[in-house]
Amino acid sequence: MPKTGPKQARVEPIHEAEDMNLPVIGWHVIDETDPGNEIVVSEHDTEAEAIRAAEEYEQREE
């Protein structure tokens, strides 16, 4: 089914070994346009880079 409406992305921290108490080791940008099929679209070293990438991703045309 084709996506309708604008893309929506979110930024999430990457923790070592999925333990929220460990330091953040990177950041994922996740396409959440279709909540039933969320996709990691990129990975970044800093939160600022990930936020910029998420904003650019949302603006991109398919």
Image (cartoon, rainbow, N blue to C red):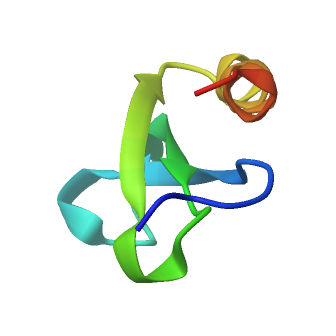
Nearer the observer, 39 or 25: 39
Residue drawn at 76 percent across, 19 percent down: 56
In this picture, residue 35 sits left or right of residue 10: left
Tell me where residue 30 appears, x and y as whole percent: 51, 50
Nearer the observer, 19 or 2: 2
Q: Quadrant of the C terminus?
A: top right
Residue drawn at 45 percent across, 70 percent down: 21
Q: Quadrant of the N terminus?
A: bottom left
In this picture, residue 2 sits left or right of residue 58: left
Tell me where residue 38 appears, x and y as whole percent: 42, 65
* Whether residue 39 is situated above or below residue 42 in the rendered picture: below
Nearer the observer, 33 or 4: 4
* Whether residue 10 is situated above or below residue 24 in the rendered picture: below
Residue extending farthest front: 1
* Whether residue 26 is situated above or below residue 34 in the rendered picture: above
In this picture, residue 26 sits left or right of residue 46: left
In this picture, residue 10 sits left or right of residue 22: right
Tell me where residue 48 appears, x and y as whole percent: 77, 22
* Whether residue 56 is situated above or below residue 21 in the rendered picture: above
**Total numbered labels placed on residues in the image:** 0
Residue extending farthest bottom: 36
Residue drawn at 62 percent across, 22 percent down: 46
Tell me where residue 22 appears, x and y as whole percent: 39, 59
Residue drawn at 44 percent across, 72 percent down: 20
